[in-house]
Amino acid sequence: MSEYDAPAEAAPEDMGPVPVLAVVGRPNVGKSTLVNRIIGRREAVVEDRPGVTRDRVSYDTSWSGRAFTVVDTGGWDPDARGMAERIRAQAEIAVSLADAVLFVVDATVGITDADEAVVQVLRRSKKPIVLAANKVDDERIEAEAYGLWNLGLGEPWPVSAIHGRGSGDLLDAVLEALPETPEERFHEVGGPRRIALVGKPNVGKSSLLNQLAKEERVVVDNVAGTTVDPVDELITLGDREWRFIDTAGIRKRVKAASGHEYYASLRTSSAIERAEVAVLVVDGSESLSEQDVRILQTIRESGRALVIAFNKWDLVDGERRYYLDREIERELVQVQWAPRINVTARTGWHIDRLVPALDKALVGWETRIPTGQLNAFLGRLVAEHPHPVRGGKQSKILFGTQAQTAPPTFILFTSGKLDAGYERFIERRLREEFGFVGTPIELQVRAREKRKR
C-alpha cells in the first residue's frame, strides 16, 4: 500500500454487518498512525504525545477486496486513574465488541509491564489477536522486534506505520484473523440520517450522545476538549436509526489552532459537510460567545439544516433566561428559522424533543416548490411590494425556479440587480409562505444582460 493511497470504501448499510477489528495498545505506540495507514487516509488525529485519542472511533475500509471496520482506541494503561481510566474502559469495550484484535507494541522499546498486563486482559477475551511490532523502520530494528515472541501471542508482524513498511503482510494476517467478510460494494444507497453534534468545548456534546444512546459510548470529562476525533454512532430513536457524529469542540479559528486542535477542527468541519443536520449544542447557563456565532456561520455556509440545543438547562434560573432571550434576539437574528430546544443532557430532561426538531429541519431542508406555484407567489409578491427605484430604474423579477433542495436553492431571473435588503425580504416571505423550518435558503440572482445596439 503506497503512502496513504485510500482503498475503496465499503458500504456496510448495503452489505449487512462487516467484521470489526479493534486496534489497542498502551499510549503513544502509534495506533492512530497505523489506523491511518490501514484505512488509507489521514482520518485519526495523530500527535507526538500520548492521550490524543480518547474514544472508540470507527472507520470503514477494505483490503484485497474484503471490507471490515477498524476501531481506533485510546492508550490502554492498566493502572490508569481519572480520565485515563475511562479511556481504558472504552478500549476494553472495543475489544468485547470486536471480532479480532490488533495489539500494537512499540518495537523500539520492547515488552513493558503495561504490555504484559494488557495481554492478560486480551487472553481472557478469547478473541483472535494479531501482534503488530510498530516503528520498525529498518532491518536492525526488525531483528529486535522478534523479541516480542515472548509475549506468547504468536508471530509479531514488523511494520512501520509512518512509512508503510510491512503493512501489506500485516493486513493479510488481519484478514486471516477476521471471520469471512462480505464482498466489497462500491456504492451507498440510503442509510440512516446523519446528524453532527457541534459546539465549543465542554458544552455537553458527548454527554448528549451518551444520553441518546443510553450508555457511555464516548468519554466524558469536565476538562474541555475531551473529544478529539469525530465519533460516529448508530443510535435508534423513535423506531428509526440515526447516525450521530460527536465532534471535537471548536475552540478557535482553524488558522489560529495548532497541533491536534488544528486537525480536530478540520475533522469537525468535515463532519459538518458529511452530515445532513448540524445540532449546535450551546451551554444555556453561559452567555452566547463569539465561538458560538462563528460555528453558526460555518453551518450556514455549509448549507446544512440546523437545530440549536441549549444544554445544561437545569442551571438556568429566571434571571439567566431573561438575558438569554435578549442574546437570542441579538446574536441569533440570522438563524431565527432554526428550531430551538432546551435540554439537560446529564439527566436526559427533554432530550425526547430532539427527534421532532430534527424531523422538522429535514423536511424544510428537502422541501421543493413547483415552478408554477413559485412564480405565482413571486408575481403576487412583486405586485404588492415592487423593488425600489434606483437611479431612475426599477429591477423586476422575470422568472424564478428552484434549482435544488438540501439546501433549497432558488434562481431568480431579473431585469437588473436586486438590493440585498430586497433579497432578504424575498427569503423572509418564502419562509412565511412555504415553511423551510431549520434550513438555510440560497438565492441566486441572474440579471438579464443589456443588448448592445
Image (cartoon, rainbow, N blue to C red):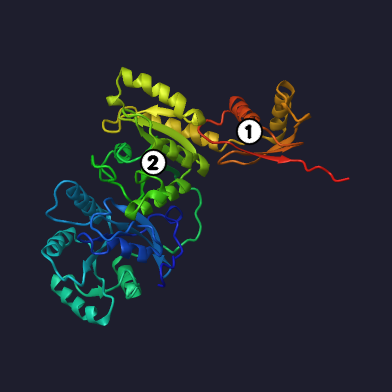
Q: Where 177 sits versus 252, above or below?
A: below
Residue on which the image places disc 2: 197
Quarter of the image where the C terminus is located: top right
Task: Confirm whether residue 49 shows in the render.
Answer: yes
Task: Confirm whether residue 239 shows in the render.
Answer: no
| Number of numbered discs on residues | 2
Check the image and name the residue furthest to the front: 391
Residue on which the image places disc 1: 420
Which residue: 22% across, 78% down? 141
Nearer-the-camera pick, 413 or 367: 413
Q: Residues under labels 1 and 2: Cα distance?
A: 32 Å
Which residue: 41% across, 70% down? 3
Check the image and name the residue furthest to the right: 453
Name the kind of residue labelled 2 in the image: Leu
Instruction: Give the left or right position of residue 269, taking residue 159 as reference.
Output: right
Q: Residue 97 appears at what percent x and percent y?
A: 27, 54
Instruction: Describe the element under mark 1 as helix, strand or loop.
Output: helix
Q: Are marks 1 and 2 in contact (CB under 8 Å)?
A: no
* Residue 212 falls in image quadrant: top left
